[in-house]
Amino acid sequence: MNPVTSVSKEQLRAAAIEVLRLNDLGTMTSAAPNLYPHMWSWDAAFVAIGLARTSVPRAVTELRTLLNAQWSTGMIPHIVFSDNDTGYFPGFDRWGTANAAALPAGVKSSGICQPPVHAIALRHIVDRGRENGGADQAAAEEFLAESFDGWLAWHRWLATVRDPDGVGLIEIHHGWESGFDNSPRWDGPYARVVPGAVAPFTRRDTLHVADISERPDDAEYTKYLWLVQQMADVAFDDDAVRQVVDFRVRDVFFSAIMAASSAVLADLGDEIGRDKEAGELRLMAARFQAGVASTVDPATGLARDYDVLAGQSIGTETVSGFAPLVSGGDPALLAAQRELLQGPRWMGFPDLRFPLPPSTSPASDAFRPRTYWRGPVWPFLNLLLGWAAARDGEPGLYGRLRSASLQQLADLQFGEYYEPFTGEPLGSLAQAWTAAAALEWMG
Ligand code: 9WN
């Protein structure tokens, strides 16, 4: 058992700031010091939320760097590569994005995306700037005005290219796009991916974790690289990718973030006189909120992904089933979900070290307590659930998530993910978005 270390808020704050400082590469923050020596899209959003607590201008720089890598289509890539060419696999060369027509000159990025948490991060930056006043406020307001069209283009790209039929759900083409890489959510779709010849590869992630069985295995990696190769073969052209790729899933959690973020961006648009665009974003928010709600399984109360190629819903019991709590909406649905989340299959499961939702329910056969997205607790997700609870006027749930998170993070390790029963930090330590979550929880 990992005892709850009794640390003061000041100690926790100082340690979290130090982790962000160690990961600071100047104009971007590496997601983790060794395992992830580049900028990841949704990590950067959470990092910006944490940075806004210590330096509004530095938080602005983080999002500005990410937005500078935006493709001409509007897509924000999931990795912006730093100059560290050797630390991570697959790197820029293996991605093959140099041939993509939409990649901006001078940018090295991957060719897929991650959930659009960015407008939520921008909201935090603007709020901190206004609280602080002076130069912080000026920097935040200036960035809002400068970047609004970029975020709008990102949301428009998602709403059209990734939901061409207007069903209110975002289609993803790789498990990495979900950010829940090897979640049991994707076992069905990946079981149907039969890789052709994949160029030989040497993984690097396995060098940076204490126990490699926590990470996806080589067979999973072969499939991950096969999908990258399929996309590279058509130079990451959006229409062509949809035709050729072997993984097409409507991701309910991604869609929920799209709904929540679109609503936030609409408010920000109103604040700078962009009423027409705000109206467009509100329609997007409503469309994706409805799309998410439409997937809820009445038998389990959980929202479900949809495997497009197999033509079937995915019924695994993972934390993504709580997507409606992120997208917001129907009060009765949200009340039922809050009860489920705090009930015996999730936060109330017996003997959890801290009452926080594991990535897969411990009551499910798919649960693996130490394996990445198959069971461990991910601190950044709890921050997102807490933000949504506060938005929806639910101080009880917010307070429970906050207090358990602060106890979990008092180990000062800032683990990438945590073993739910022992509270052990796993994966990378000094993970940037975990430190950012600690800073934001402290306020
Ligand atoms: C692949 C950086 C990222 C997170 C993801 C997490 C993990 C990458 C990997 O690390 O994914 O994108 O190599 O395992 O699953 O959510 O953004 O922290």
Image: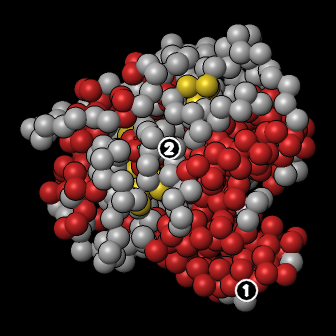
Three-letter amino acid code of the residue under disc 2: Pro
Q: Residues within 10 Å of mark 1 (few under 14, many from 20)?
A: few
**Quadrant of the rendered image containing residue 253:** top right
Q: Position of residue 407 (x, y in %)?
A: 80, 29
Say if 220 sits above or below 335 in the image.
Answer: above
Dot 1: element: loop
Dot 2: element: loop
**Quadrant of the rendered image containing residue 318:** top right
Which residue is painted at 58% across and 49% down in the image? 22
Which residue is painted at 70% across and 23% down in the image? 346
Q: Compare marks 2 and 1 and give the one earlier in the sequence.
A: 2
- Who is closer to the viewer here, 331 or 115? 115
Q: Position of residue 79 (x, y in %)?
A: 41, 56
Q: How crowded is mark 2: few (under 14 residues within 10 Å), some or many (20 or more)?
A: many
**Residue 337 visible in rendering:** yes
Say if 162 sits above or below 175 in the image.
Answer: below
Colouring style: secondary structure
Position of 251 with respect to 228 (left or right) is: right
Position of 415 with respect to 175 (left or right) is: right
- Who is closer to the viewer here, 129 or 396? 129
Q: Name the residue under label 1.
A: 272
In the image, farthest residue toward the bottom: 273
How many numbered discs?
Answer: 2
Q: Which mark is residue 33?
A: 2
